[in-house]
Image (cartoon, coloured by chain):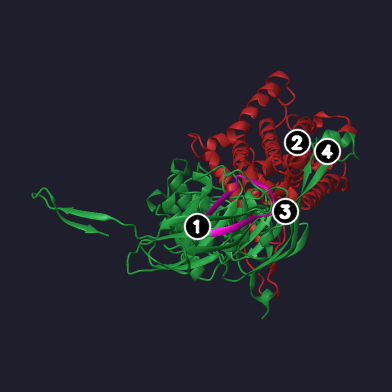
Chain colours: A green, B red
Amino acid sequence: MNEADASAILVQGVSKRFRIPGERVMTLKERALHPLRRLPWQDLTAVDDVSFSVPAGEFFAVVGRNGSGKSTLLKCLAGIYAVDSGQMFVRGRMSTFIELGVGFNMELPARENVIINGTMLGLSPREARRRLDQVLEFAELEQFADLRLKNYSSGMLVRLAFAVMIQVDADVLLIDEVLAVGDAAFQQKCYDEFARLRREGRTMVLVTHDMGAVERFCDRALLLEQGSTVAVGDPHAVGLRYMELNFAREDGRPQTGAEEADRLGDGRAEILEAWFEDDEGQPATALPSGRRCSFAARVRFREDVEDPILGFAVQNGEQQTALAASTLAAMPSLGWFRAGEEVTFRIAFENVFRPDRYYATPAVAHAGTGFAWIDRRERLVEVVVTGASRTDAIVDLPYRMTLERAGTGHAQTEVAG
Amino acid sequence: MTTTDAAPDEPLGRLIRGPSAVGGDWRRLVHLTRLLAVTDFRLRFFGSVLGYLWQVVHPLLLFGVLYVVFTQVVRIGSDVPFYGVALLSGIVLFVFLSEATSQAVQSLVDREPIVRKIQFPRLAVPLSVVLTALFRLSLNLLVVFAFLLAAGGDARVSWLELPVLIALLTTLAGGLAALLSALYVHFRDVKPIWDVVLQVIFYGSPIFYPIDVITNDTARELLMLNPFAAILQQFRHAVIDPSNPSAAEAIGGDARLLVPLGLIAAAAVVGFRYFARKAPRIAEEL
């Protein structure tokens, strides 16, 4: 069985162009008067030769900035748009959710709307009627079944729409930004349902901006930019590329870290090396907790750069950030650095980390938000913090604790952490 | 939002095709057409006190005005047997054609939210408008029959022609609805143009005048080439009173009926073909 055999969705070289007319409206009269005249138009390639396959049971994300073509790609998959070239195949029953509650009519009661929406989703009216009770139960709206939708709160509407969508029982789900709606409790319910769908081996293609959701749910991600595939693969790596695209400079310089997946930036400066130092200033790979230590990185500028931001972040194995420090707040204006100049920056701090393994990411960025990377080397240095502390917190901050007993009026017990 | 089933025998899975008029699934077309039509029809009942009555008020009002004018003022109809019922039947059939087509013109644009968000057989949109109009026609025909019996008309075997006539009229309306809705996506002046055409059909068909009023044979025969006029005339002959000339008599021979019938077929074929050609791109051109 080769890859194509196992895929729930197979997309081969799909392109989609839109014709954007110069002047939108043409009347029949004009057409009759000028039968040969064609309106000026320009072609916009929304999706450009995209290929990928999604194995059955995989959660696959399509990410990209606004206008990158991700929603168009989804609509092509859904069969709403006809493609200009390429082929797409799907295995199993497919359902598309571009929007929750398509076809809902505010003047009609929930009961009817569930049947309308279900039929729109592709159920036969009989199937839709059979699922009615389950849907209302899932949405916890049984007692409001005969209430007209215009009297529903927006939260109830969303619950009802999501319930219909979940009850359709498709093998392959195409979902566009559905999670963007609803309150936190509803989103949690969505996530729980996605977890259930995943356990049941359903396949999902999710279009979103939300990299958090992507890293949380998706096995793989596809990054689109101007209709073309930029990256496919591990959600974390794709997420980093996405961040980079979001803040990339416009001149499209080649990325120095292109061969190195965990390296981002335009390469105007280079982080040569980085290391941790113990309380005596000696390079160390293990640091006892509770002592002073520092992190240092050596940077060489390849081109003139004004006011760069130097910084680093320390994360534990669960990718929780324990410390992030940069010159952004304290020294916003470092002045010019000339091509060829080498600097070493050092950040000293009290090591209050919980004993664990940590990874440091040094970065140099352009002035501004701090996301326009010049060089960023993801998890370049590894360090182990040793110690006897057994805290569950990420950091083991020093603290003092007092206990006062009623009636005595003064501290009886004092503990230092 | 759409769900479709796969054919398991294809090696790569089912090929995803873009949207189309019918989508290879007649059942889904029928389901959706009915669903859209029933929903639309029910919405008119909802929230109005007179509900059902409003469905027949429009043709009855038009009927009232024309009846008074043509029996009391102009007096074309005062000596025609069953003039009132004949007039009402003309109005009811015309209101059906007019409603089905003029509401279909904008139907794809009105249904934009679903057209752009789910994959479904696009033809369901204009056809549902025709079906809604057909529901109203059935209600209105009940009134026509009530008037006919009240005026002393009798049930006759030729009433059996009724379903055939309604089927022909629905075919005509369906073809026009498909054609006009697809045209409107590109050409927004279709609506005023079509409103004018409907006016021409109204005065060019024997709705408020009996066909015998036109004494010039050529003029009458030309008028009867209009499929709506032919259907209406046959309806009056078969359903209301045999003293009305049949469509064949009015047009001057059975063979000539092929012209209005051909026009109905042409409306259906051209409407469907044009719609099918436009269907894949409707979602992006709205």
**Residue at the spot of label 3:** A253
**Residue A178 screen position, x and y as percent:** 54, 53
State the mark number for residue B224: 4
**Residue B132 screen position, x and y as percent:** 62, 44
**Residue B136 screen position, x and y as percent:** 61, 41
Q: Residue at x 84, y 46 (%)?
A: B257
Amino acid type assigned to the residue bearing label 4 in the image: Met
Is residue B25 shown left or right of residue A145? right
Q: Which portion, as a residue range, is magenta?
A: A297-312
Using the image, determine if residue B91 lies above or below residue A118: above
- Per the model, the C-alpha gap separating discs 3 and 4 is 75 Å
Question: Helix, strand, or loop for circle 1?
Answer: strand
The chain identifier of the residue carrying mark 3 reads A
Question: Helix, strand, or loop for circle 2?
Answer: loop
Position of the N terminus of chain A, as image quadrant, is bottom right
> Along the polypeptide, which appears first: circle 2 or circle 4?
2
Amino acid type assigned to the residue bearing label 3 in the image: Arg
Image quadrant assignment for residue A239: bottom right
Residue density around tag 3, few if under 14, some if 14–19, many if 20 or more, within 10 Å: few
Q: Nearer the viewer, residue B116 or B57?
A: B116
**Residue at the spot of label 1:** A313
**Residue at the spot of label 2:** B188
